[in-house]
Image (tube, grey):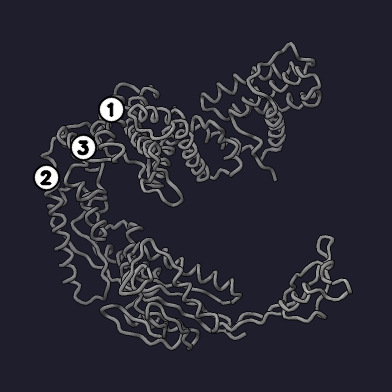
Amino acid sequence: MSKRDFLLEIGLEELPARFVTNSINQFKEKIETWLREERLNYDTISAFATPRRLAILVEGLDESQPDIEEEAKGPAKKIAYDGDGNWSKAAQGFARGQGVATDDLFFKEVKGVEYIFANKFVAGKKTVDLLPTMKELILSLHFPKNMRWGSNDLRFARPIRWLVAMYGDEIIPFSITGITSGNKTTGHRFLGNEIELKTPNDYVVSLLGEYVIANPDERKRAIRNQIESMTEGNGWVVPIDEDLLEEVTHLVEYPTALSGSFDEDFLKLPKEVLITSMKEHQRYFPVQDENGDLLPYFITVRNGDHQHLENVSKGNEKVLRARLSDAAFFYHEDQKLDIKDALQRLEQIVYHEELGSVGDKVRRVSQIVAKLSEQLQVNSTTLQTANRIAEIGKFDLVTQMVNEFPELQGRMGEVYAELAGESKEVSKGIHEQYKPRFAGDTSPSTLAGTIVSVAEKLDTIVTCFAIGLIPTGSQDPYALRRQAAGVVQMLHDHKLEITLQQLLKITLGIAEGRKLLKRDSEEIEKELFDFFRLRVRALLQDQGVQYDIIDAVLVEEIGHLPTVIQKAKVITEKRGDVAFKKVVEALSRVTNIAKKADGGKAIDSSLFEKEEEEALFKHYEELKVQVEVALEKGDASSAFEALASSEPVINRYFDNIMVMSENEQVRANRLAQMDELAKVIHTFAQFQNIVFA
């Protein structure tokens, strides 16, 4: 079959850098899906993206769909004939619908019933006739934010300025907002010219000739290589932030790296202030020496060639100088602010209209910290440190530096607190109360900082749930999922001797005491537990635990999180043992039949009729203590071994005892025995959820 290449390009006003990756991936996926649904074969598909264009090149695209023959199923045989033995109207209608004569119909049996069938021939359509529907595919793209322009009704990420749609040397015609597709694209906004393409394969080379590197991976590679070349020539160290590199890649079409410098006096500012000013506000790469200390230089990337780089460098230096001058001013002015005065100003900052001021939040967090510290039985030094962190931890929110650079919240609190004479532990805790900030971030390094961080996040989550601000779908404006994951991570990392249930009850109690609950507390607690349960599940998945083992260990009461993780590890390790399946089957027999028990009924040993009942009861009493003691110590391995020792006792019991006795009292007593033993088993896991191949 003949093949041709196909090119589809959307030319746009500059897209925000954060839109580009998702947009081009979405564009490619849509075209791949369309090609698959239209039964069009091709050799390769490539995606290209710059701030001003999204493009897909399909190489070796068949010129038509393949012809297909398929069987179409019609009515049952009993209604295919009329009373005279002729084809019924139903059969005739089916034949017409399939484009065949009634003589071509035949019968086949399906599940014991005969139906009429027809062999239907579907001629493949020409690709050139199908491609104009690409217009609808373009219109189906979605973006984080859309806009309208001119008098057009279309909402799109940015105004469309040109369209290229070529199949071989043939233009595929359609138009969007008055822009008609053609074979002309545009080079670099300032350095390039309009390009008339002869074939789709000319696309990449032609753009390069007009100062556009269409492949984002090649642009990223070029930026990285240029930065590395500059560092080697100057003896610099530039740790490349991958997120910043990704953003810069999508800000330029023809990258050229250059360096600049700033006054060494600015190095007296905290390192984070300089880095934030360069990275977050100017998209510059900071420069360090071999010891990791900042040097008074930066590297930036120009969207253009090497002409007049000295002037570009001076312009960037001027902008950065103004930024750093402002930062230096804020830094010195903030040091005049007394912490007590700063705390008073927190009363004027609204945290949430239904939850009060930031000052109110500070008081709630302080209460939670006190309760957690008591529960964890921390020493007096840790308690004093945690209380102080909670008390002054938000004071930097009223500083000029944090107002200008919100990313420095916590870090500036650490710096200013230490300058004001606070201990290093308290100062560090002010910064670490926000950790972990994101997936992969570390937990706070100290116990005091961890307690405050847990309290701060729990207050945010619980009070949001209390007033109905619960994440739905992809909507999570207060980042409650991330904060809940942070709490789970800290419980794991620091092996805190407290359960999620205890944490939620403490925090809910404080919120209820301040009359913040807008709904029933039990309902809120259940929703919160389910919410945290999903975060624990995610943690176990990240550690490679299989889904059925996760279902087994996430019992109704999660309990001590590090112990839950140990349980999962023990089951994962034991799963390959031959004896493991027998143990699980025995324990599951107990838990499955225990579901028939009324619950709450005490075991009456006087109703035992056989020695196997006595033996199981004696084993149960010993097992209950062994499992409880082992789990309290966090020794999941010993707890499992104790349960595993039950296998022969349980099997002997079931081999000789009929639990569902005709005697009502005996039956109820045996079910009570199963119920009590099941409770012990469930303190470790719900073994019936484990799946065997």
Question: Which residue is disc 1 drawn over?
Answer: 387
Whether residue 425 is visible to the viewer of this picture, yes or no, is no
Nearer the N terminus, badge 2 or badge 3?
2
At x 51% / y 72%, what residue is drawn? 31
Q: Residues within 10 Å of mark 1 (few under 14, many from 20)?
A: many
Q: Residues within 10 Å of mark 3 (few under 14, many from 20)?
A: many
Of residues 648 and 93, which is closer to you in this image?
Answer: 93
Question: Which residue is disc 2 drawn over?
Answer: 332
| Residue type marked 3 | Leu
At x 36% / y 58%, what residue is drawn? 242
| Residue type marked 2 | His
Left or right for 445, reference 278:
right
Q: Secondary structure at mark 3?
A: helix
Give the x, y percent position of residue 281. 23, 58
| Residue type marked 1 | Asn
Labelled pair 2, 3 in contact (Cβ < 8 Å): no
Nearer the N terminus, badge 2 or badge 1?
2
Q: CA distance from mark 2 to mark 3?
A: 21 Å
Identify the image quadrant of the N terminus. bottom right
Question: Which residue is disc 3 drawn over?
Answer: 346
Q: Residue furthest front?
A: 83
Whether residue 407 is visible to the viewer of this picture, yes or no, is yes
Of residues 623 and 156, which is closer to you in this image?
Answer: 156
Nearer the N terminus, badge 1 or badge 3?
3
Labelled pair 2, 1 in contact (Cβ < 8 Å): no
Front of the two marks 2 and 3: 3
Q: Height in image: 437 above or below 246?
A: above
Q: Residues within 10 Å of mark 2 (few under 14, many from 20)?
A: few
Left or right for 196, reference 168:
left
Q: Residue furthest top?
A: 606
